[in-house]
Amino acid sequence: MIALKVNGISRQFNGDPKMPLLWYLRDELGLTGSKFGCGEALCGTCTVHLGGEAVRSCVTSVADAAGREVTTIEGLDSDGNHPVQRAWRAENVPQCGYCQAGQIMQAAALLQANPDPSDEEIIEGMEGNICRCGTYQRIHAAVRTAAKEV
Amino acid sequence: MAQIINVSRRDMLKAAGASGALVLGAHLAPRAMFGEAQAAGASAAPNFFVSIDGSGAVTLTCSRSEMGQGVRTGMPMIIADEMEADWNRVKIWQAPGDPAKYDPPGKDAQNTDGSRSTRHGFDAMREMGASARYVLEQAAAKKWGVGAAEVYAKDHRVYHSGSGKSLGFGQLAGAAADIKVPTGDAKPKLKHPSEWKYIGKDMPVVDNFDITTGGASFGADVSIPGMKIAVVARSPVYRGKVKSFDATEALKVQGVEQVVEIPALADDKGAEFRALGGVAVVGSNTWSVMQGREKLKIDWDLGPHVAHDSSTYDDALRASAKKGGLKIRDRGDVDLAMKAASKVVEAEYFVPYFIHTPMEPPVAVVDASRTPVKVIAATQSPNQARHYVAEALGMDKKDVECEVTLLGGGFGRKSKADFICEAAIVSKEIGAPVRMQWTREDEIRNGFYHAACAQHLSAGLDADGKVTAWKQSGAWPSIVGLWNPVAKNGFGIEFGLGLVDLPYNSVPNIRIENGAEDIMIRVGWYRSVNNIQHAYAMNCFANELATAAGRDPLEMLLELIGDADNMDLAKDGVEKYWNYGDSIADWPIMPNRLSNALRAVAEKSGYGKAMPKGHGLGLACHRSFQSYVATAVHAVVHDDGSLHIPRVDVAIDCGRYVNPEGIRKQIEGAVIYGNTVARHGKITTTKGAVDQSNFDDYPVTRISDAPLDVQVHIVEDFLHLRPCGVGEPGVPPFAPALVNAIFDATGKRIYQLPVGDQLKKI
Ligand code: FES
Ligand code: FES
């Protein structure tokens, strides 16, 4: 049995410890905000925070999260008003929206570690997150906007 | 246009199976899509697109699939504007597939592709709004006992112009429910464009809050009671079949419950959008069934398409393009003009297969254990989904319902119902609802590919450097193969995607041909479709001709296009130009709009100014989906061959438009999509199987190689003309503008997409 915390709530898991966190969150807990895009740590749509750092939940097993704190997009801010979320709306970033939970979680972790990133650092920090709708210009602007507030 | 139907309140209640309060769609999916309109008090529903409840809450229907193009914002904006609703009090309800109700223009049965939602729906949505305003105004006039001419709706209220008294929409809903909407000449008047308050103004995406908080509901986010999850092992080669399989090991995986064969589609049936067959692993969670699938042992009969190998097929396409054959446009006498030319230039351009890679792989939930069968899917085309699911299950289409979730990208992939049919077949077999989940590998290896295409071009120049003859011949595997596997030529729709409508109207002699080739894989629509290769070849070749003639590329391009306000293809022997399904009288081909957009982008991008070494500015322009788009790419090629794009300017003339913010976003996105096409996208096959599988070997644009300064210029000179497409037309001109910029920067021409590492070899 694995014990972990997800968005502040204690959870226990009895299934296959190798199950990726992504499928545990989506299929077992019904937290569908984290998305499946590649399953191979190539696209970032599944990004969550593990102990405050951005990880790809598709390649992070539940066992890896044992005893640790997982935060998903649903738990980033109780009112959905984290500075990054607000910046995303202010810049009207989303198109289809599928990648955006991962983008937001990535950006939030980036700003946590580096509250005033340069243009280059934003690009480096966000490079692992694909947006097939092509919202990168607005993502870049929104990270900059959020940085002013974090 | 179909008539707007009066829906009496009782009918609506009956339809919703409710009594008392009006309930619009009791949906199972989470919050974003279906704000469950639990109506307060009496309600009015003057048509299938508007309902107003006693609290004044207005629910507007979106009957088109949202895949990021902003349709759930744009279409309701039109209704809200005409009815004078306050946008802040509007909720959007996503319609299921039912063309009788939800396709008032009667043109495409809610099939959301072809960049046509606004084009086809603009007038109809205005009428929906106007009829809602009408019933509210009439209700107020009746209540006050005054003439209808004395009342007017404004900002969610109806006012009496004499006294200034007013009633809110909610207070009028009950009385408005009994008022009939007149038709014909008496039908409610539309606003004058000067009175619009939303149309033409920036509006953010309605789903922004849900999307940024994880509450938006996509295909894979739908769960219904008793639902199982399935993945399918499919043949690596198109239309290969299962000979036999052993599921023993798969069934040992914890969470795997059943293994079910999906029978191969019968040989005498075209692939169309049907399920092709395979072995489904069914279980309680996605991880288990994915693990189980790994453990299947399947013996495949791969069939004849093992002969499909890029190493030989690409050359066959090139040879076929050179040979030409089927004449599809013939103006003047090309052969004679070539002989008389003082210079003849020849070139060949090649574009490989691409695959869509929407961030959300295909996924659908189907419950075929009940009648009517319930489909809840990320589909661009709910009624085609109903058709194919009904066929797969041997049922009547009317016994299949289809609700539409948000789509995590579509790009044409999700207009095909194959993945939904798989879900339906497995659901019926196991007698429980099924969520069919595709992985990225499935999506890349078992998709509908954008056609690889070779084009052979030649042109004659006279002594003054004017183009006197243009000959272009293309060969590609046609989409028509989905219906007719032995077809070898393209068809009218493909010809009309920027080839037969070559916009170089000033050239006196034009011949366009199509070469024949076998179709060896599923080919399908892909954002902007064949326009990609056609725009690439013609814009780059025009640039090449400018160089050959020692002329400025912009001047050459403007001269080729000219300024006629109509290009009549019928005069050039083009049979039945399809014109994107629209009447040529309403949407003629207007070369003057193309040159106008080109001039605009040249000016905005600072075309003509001196550039540092290694920098280049490239132009391209293209008409597609009725819009006219010109793109200027500023590219920098460094000594090591690396490429950087500091700025892109795009001018778009899409006629009358609804949401300029939406247009900017679509163009920004189209530039990024075009960047993938131009620099990365490439699907190849070996012995019939697709070589690529995920984003490591099928790279797409990331923020690190994305143009991050895309300037969109909406050209308003033809604002009085009908709305045109926006979702796709930004894609085609990007690749040729980039390739022309690379030439400007380096003197190297790219004859084959993607650019990839070709610059490293300079
Ligand atoms: S799904 Fe995890 S990185 Fe793509
Ligand atoms: S918004 Fe669609 S993938 Fe990013």
Image (cartoon, coloured by chain):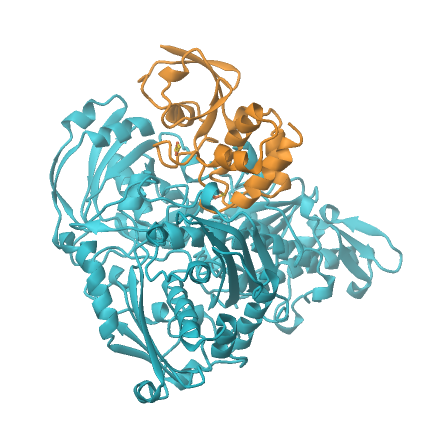
Chain colours: A orange, B cyan
Residue B716: x and y, percent? 63, 67
Quadrant in which residue B412 is drawn: bottom left
Residue drawn at the location 45% of the way across and 39% of the way down: B218
Residue toward you, B739 or B621: B739
Q: Is residue B283 left or right of residue A117?
A: left
Residue drawn at the location 64% of the way across and 73% of the way down: B185
Q: In this view, does B605 lie to the left or right of B276?
A: right
Question: In the rendered image, which quarter contains the C terminus of chain B?
Answer: bottom left
Q: Is residue B426 above or below residue B663?
A: above
Residue B128 visible in this rendered orientation of the protein:
yes
Residue drawn at the location 19% of the way across and 27% of the way down: B250
Q: Is residue B25 above or below residue A40?
A: below
Residue B75 visible in this rendered orientation of the protein:
no
Residue toward you, A39 or B130: A39
View quadrant of ligand 1: top left
Q: Which residue lies furthest to the right in this view?
A: B163
Residue B144: x and y, percent? 82, 56
Q: Is residue A65 left or right of residue A94?
A: left
Residue toward you, B138 or B454: B454
Q: How many labels does the image show?
A: 0
Residue B432: x and y, percent? 31, 34
Residue B645: x and y, percent? 49, 51
Quadrant in which residue B387 is drawn: bottom left
